[in-house]
Image: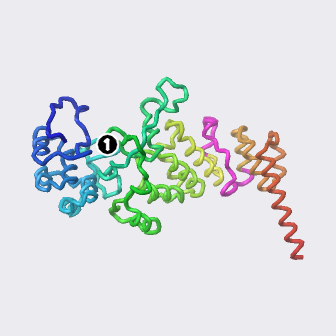
Amino acid sequence: MSKNIPDMKKEEEIPYCIWHPHTADEPTYRALAKKYPQMRYHVGRPCAVAGYTNLFHELDLLSDISIAEEARDNNKLVIFDSIMSSPFKYAVMNDYTRSINTDNPRVGNLNADTAVRSTLEIKQKYRSTPEPDDPSRPWPDHQWQYYFFKYGYHFNITEDWCVDENETDLCKELPGDAQLLPLLYSPLPLDLPNIDKDLLVLTAAYYGDIDRYARLRRPHIKEPELSCIVRGIYHNTMFAKWWSNQPEAQPEAHEWKHAIRCAITARFIMNNDLSRVTEETPERDLPYLIYYPSLAQPSTYEELVRRKPSMAPQVARASIIMDHQWLYDKLPVKPDQGLMREAKQALIHITLLISKEELTS
């Protein structure tokens, strides 16, 4: 960007983003691509930012999705139209991992998975993080970036997490509201417009829409998304089944994702399927809520307690809701606050039903 081309002998010395905070001139990028052919796609991105059309065509690149989204965001429509006219588009550049895949790039479409230049101006205020030896630090060193994902920053192509002295008001800066809202109630187009798709991801997860979620999801799961996923699993059996086959839902996955495994198991239980409850099932993967939004058969709950006696409190609440005294009496549980509240609520419900019958008789 300063018109100087350094000597880069190792792979880790090659930067990913060479177009922010400003671009170099066209001859500099041309010389860079000539000296380092492996950086042709790195050079293609600033061509889409600055509109270096001649250089872009000289590079003879595959029709890359990220470069197309970058060109559209910067209103460089000649480059954008050139890519979009291709019968196939490829995901060569990966802004999530800051990597280039020229060996076997995936064929795809524009999916709002690019950290376009305008979004790099969205800053977050510096926050101190726990020291590596601090026992309160909730993640190992290689997962410290989850701290930043929590605050809505999916990309780090500038390798500084867009840290600044002041926080950007996301409500004012995020693009595409006018284009985003219709997509909540319309079929998704083949190529997504220039939007921040977080709301679409959360909505798809919340309702358990497998097709939309599988297409829109990002490689990492943010905190609000996790809650929506759990809700979607509880209310959609097919979504629960789909998630049960995903890597994130396997026992060896990251510990904080046990909420997904718990939700899947709960949905299976409420469908009278105890295949996920065995002697080997860890206690942390056993759910508490196993009686909403639907109830299993009493025999399912009875077998559940036989397999996992620690599930007796959950089954006790289900037996109260179902008004099955015989099942409750079999359970080795002591009344707690949750059971008392459930019993009171059930009593109120029964009283209201009796009153309604008396009024109509």
Identify the image's colour scheme: rainbow, by chain, secondary structure or one colour.
rainbow
> Magenta residues?
275-299
Left-right relation of 33 to 304: left
Q: Residue furthest bottom?
A: 361
Please determine whether, in this image, residue 75 is positioned above or below residue 220: below
Q: Amino acid at mark 1?
A: Ile
User: What x and y, as percent, mark residue 112?
Assistant: 35, 55
User: What x and y, as percent, mark residue 360?
Assistant: 86, 76
Q: Residue at image x 32%, y 49%? A: 115
- Which SS does the magenta portion mostly show? loop
Left-right relation of 75 to 295: left
Q: Residue at image x 48%, y 46%? A: 222
Please determine whether, in this image, residue 74 is positioned above or below residue 338: below
Q: Is residue 284 magenta?
A: yes
Residue named by callout 1 = 157
325 or 209: nearer the viewer: 209
User: What x and y, as percent, mark residue 204?
Assistant: 49, 58
User: What x and y, as percent, mark residue 32?
Assistant: 13, 41
Q: Residue furthest top?
A: 133
Quarter the N terminus occupies: top left
Quarter the C terminus occupies: bottom right
